[in-house]
């Protein structure tokens, strides 16, 4: 199990939100759960580049931060569904604004990212 060596800096809102949503797939997971994709297999299909293990780790972290809840149904095989908490729902408008900003600056962001990728390949 990973053990954190440096204590997080929690002095401002940006530090706090970084601790909660830092992770390659967390924002997408929150967005897709909000859209109604609640089963782990559905989330895996929506994010095929992520391994099931990483998705499970990030879902567990989102659950620990009170952004999602996990419901396990007592059936065989076990059925698991995730849903946003009321607290998690308050993050959706923020994610929507970030997505809108990304859409508005898509060309510029793509150019900057591709330049960085090309320069790191040299």
Image (spheres, grey):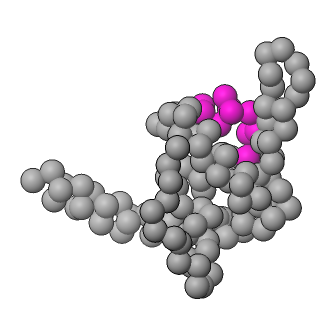
Q: What type of secondary structure mainly makes up the magenta span?
A: helix
Tell me where residue 31 appears, x and y as whole percent: 67, 53
Image quarter of residue 117: bottom left
Tell me where residue 105 appears, x and y as whole percent: 45, 69
In the image shown, does 11 or 95 lie closer to the viewer?
A: 11
Highlighted range, magenta: 33-46
Q: Is residue 115 left or right of residue 10?
A: left
Task: State the residue at coordinates (62%, 64%).
Answer: 20
Reply above or below: 6 against 69.
below
Image quarter of residue 47: top right
Reply above or below: 4 against 49.
below
Tell me where residue 39 appears, x and y as whole percent: 74, 33
Residue 14 belongs to magenta span: no
Tell me where residue 14 appears, x and y as whole percent: 57, 79
Identify the residue at the far left of this view: 122
Task: State the residue at coordinates (83%, 56%).
Answer: 85
Reply above or below: 25 against 94.
above
Q: Is residue 64 left or right of residue 15?
A: right
Identify the residue at the far bottom of this view: 11
Tell me if residue 72 can be seen.
yes
Task: State the residue at coordinates (58%, 67%).
Answer: 19
Tell me if residue 31 can be seen.
no
Q: Is residue 32 left or right of residue 55?
A: right
In the image shown, does 56 or 33 lie closer to the viewer?
A: 56
Q: Is residue 17 left or right of residue 87?
A: left
Residue 39 belongs to magenta span: yes
Identify the residue at the far top of this view: 76
Task: State the residue at coordinates (60%, 56%).
Answer: 27
């Amino acid at each position: 199990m990973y053990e954190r060596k440096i204590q997080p800096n929690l002095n401002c809102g940006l530090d706090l939100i970084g601790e909660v949503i830092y992770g390659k797939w967390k924002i997408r997971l929150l967005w897709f759960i909000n859209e109604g994709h609640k089963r782990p297999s559905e989330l895996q299909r929506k994010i095929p580049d992520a391994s099931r293990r990483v998705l499970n780790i990030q879902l567990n972290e989102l659950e620990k931060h009170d952004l999602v809840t996990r419901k396990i149904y007592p059936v065989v095989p076990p059925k698991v569904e995730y849903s946003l908490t009321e607290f998690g729902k308050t993050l959706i408008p923020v994610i929507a604004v970030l997505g809108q900003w990304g859409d508005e600056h898509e060309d510029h962001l793509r150019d900057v990212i591709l330049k960085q990728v090309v320069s790191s390949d040299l």
